[in-house]
Image (tube, helix red, strand yellow):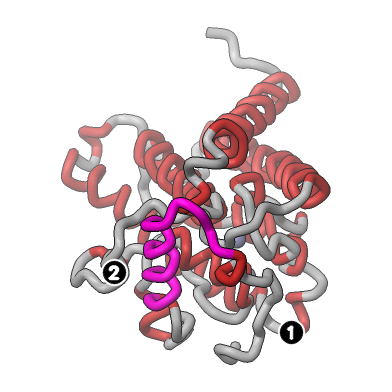
Amino acid sequence: MEALPFAERFANHLLYDILRYFLFCGIPFLIFYVWFKSPLFRFKIQPKFPGTSHIQREILYSLLSMLIFTTIGSAVFVAHRNGYTKIYTGIHEYGMAYFVFSVFLFIFLHDTYFYWSHRLMHHKKIYKHVHLIHHKSINPTPWAAFSFHPLEAVAQVLILPIMVFAIPFHPVAILLWGIYQLALNVGGHVGFELFPSGFTNNLFSKWHNTSTHHNMHHKYVTCNYGLYFNLWDRLMGTNHERYTEEFEKVCGRRKTSAIQDTEITTAQPDTSSVPL
Ligand SMILES: [Zn+2]
Ligand SMILES: [Zn+2]
């Protein structure tokens, strides 16, 4: 098949990234904020809904992030075509066991990269110039999943070239990581908690983050920096001290069909709880 000119490939890639954003963020938005807003309200983490301008800002910055993701993604593709990456195309080259291992490796290394780059974004000299855009969503919606300052979008997507220049990955392994990170990113910003009571206390499940975990990061700012796992936050003591308590409080509201006014939280960041 004739290779597409770069501009055409870039346009296709951008369209694909934008469609994927609208699909993965739009469907949860329609389910939780439009179609089943009332029956699912008892699953809402912060019992209030943000306004239209909030959602418009999240979408606009996310679209800008898509442009940056496409640019870096296209550059990685060109590098791969010219033999500069370690991407391999035949599963047999490293075997099935390595393929499965490589998916978990990508996810674990990304979790580590995310935690530490996120801590860096909270440095007082960087935070207000870059990361504050993402934190304007104190009560995030799924549209906030990629609502970043352009510099943060670059920092986020840099994980892709770092990985594929250093470690052999099959494109399907990269795709599986991509689906997992998209699902977890949208899940962390959806604003609703679906995991069952006891999830953050269970010996096994407590190591996986919840939507409440990242929602608390948006609400309280200086805690809960992790993406997929609760490993680095536990190791570094940066989990919010009331994480499990708040998670159970959110789960407890499901038992009542109507939310009491007294339970409505104010969406003001409390930066005094955990030091940077
Ligand atoms: Zn943050
Ligand atoms: Zn966030």
Which residue corresponds to mark 2?
A: 206
**What SS does tag 2 mark?**
helix
Q: Quadrant of the C terminus?
A: bottom right
The residue where tag 1 is placed is 124
Quadrant location, ligand no. 1 = bottom right
Over which residues does the magenta segment extend? 244-260
For the point 55% across and 41% down, the residue is: 38
Magenta span contains residue 208? no
Query: Relative to 110, is 201 above or below?
Result: below
Front residue of 44 and 218: 44
Residue 242 at x, y = what percent?
45, 82
- Element marked by disc 1: helix
Q: Residue at x 73, y 49 (%)?
A: 58
**Placement of 106 over or under 265, stated as above or below:** above
- Res. 99 mark: none
Seen at 71% across and 53% down, the residue is 50
Q: Residue 197 versus residue 269: which sits nearer the camera?
A: 197
The local crowd at label 1, few if under 14, some if 14 to 19, many if 20 or more residues have their Cα within 10 Å, is: few
**What secondary structure predominates along the stretch shown in magenta?**
helix
Q: Earlier in the sequence, mark 1 or mark 2?
A: 1
Q: Nearer the viewer, residue 249 or 29?
A: 249
